[in-house]
Amino acid sequence: CLDHKDSRILTCCSGIMNSVRDRTREFHLTCQSVRERQGLASRQSEKPIQTRKRFSAKAAQIGKDIHRSAEKLAKLTKLAKSKSLFDDPAAEISELSYVITQDINRLNEDLEELSSIHGLENTPNGQSNEHAGSVKKCLQSNLKGTAESFAAVLQMRSDNLQRQQSRRNEYTSDKSFAVANEPSFLRAG
């Protein structure tokens, strides 16, 4: 039932079929070879990746700690603004001041550690180095702002204490003056 054209196509195709080889095994061996070479390359690049992960985790932790310190500073600011003569939260202010001072010192040490982690990275990727430098500068800037705000709050507290002391002195000196000028029949004596 085949005509002449169809028989030529069949002959041509059967010739091609005879020359085709199954090279699947060769393909799998080539893929395995490439994977092994990439495995060696990935093991060599593993250290910078781990260093970047460590840098990122440390930077994130520092950012969170700066935020927590800023929250403590906000609470300290609220307490330091109180101007009550009789209900002064001195103990709480003193405790918060100590905690914030410790936090700032620890954060400075953490930033130094972050710098050393960044120094260990030494990647030829300029963009990665630039990003890490920017992150470090941003964290340093945030910490500097927090430390400056802390100093301003402590100065405000000192000024408030001086004003309270002068008011106390004013009231106590007026009171002693009033007692000294009291008529003698009012004094018990």
Image: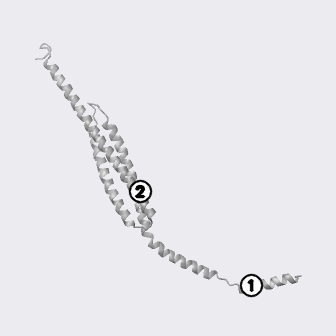
For mark 1, give the secondary structure: helix
Q: Nearer the viewer, mark 1 or mark 2?
A: 2
Residue type pointed to by label 1: Ile
Q: Is residue 136 toward the left or the right of residue 28 in the image?
A: left
Residue located beneath label 2 in the image:
134
Q: Are marks 1 and 2 in contact (CB under 8 Å)?
A: no
Quadrant the C terminus occupies: top left
Residue located beneath label 1 in the image:
16
30 lies above or below 153: below
Q: Residues within 10 Å of mark 2 (few under 14, many from 20)?
A: few
- Residue closer to the observer: 5 or 69: 5
Q: Residue at x 23, y 28 (%)?
A: 167
Q: Quadrant of residue 14?
A: bottom right
Q: Residue at x 45, y 73 (%)?
A: 43
Q: Quadrant of residue 8?
A: bottom right
158 lies above or below 28: above
Q: Position of residue 178 (x, y in %)?
A: 17, 19
Point out the residue furthest to the top here.
185
Whichever of callouts 1 and 2 sits on the residue coming sooner in the sequence is 1
Residue type pointed to by label 2: Ser
Q: Residues within 10 Å of mark 1 (few under 14, many from 20)?
A: few
Report, in whole angstroms, how far the alpha carbon at label 1 lies from the one at label 2.
62 Å
Total tally of numbered discs in the picture: 2
Q: Is residue 16 visible?
A: yes
174 lies above or below 25: above
Q: Is residue 72 toward the left or the right of residue 162 in the image?
A: right
Q: Position of residue 94 (x, y in %)?
A: 27, 42
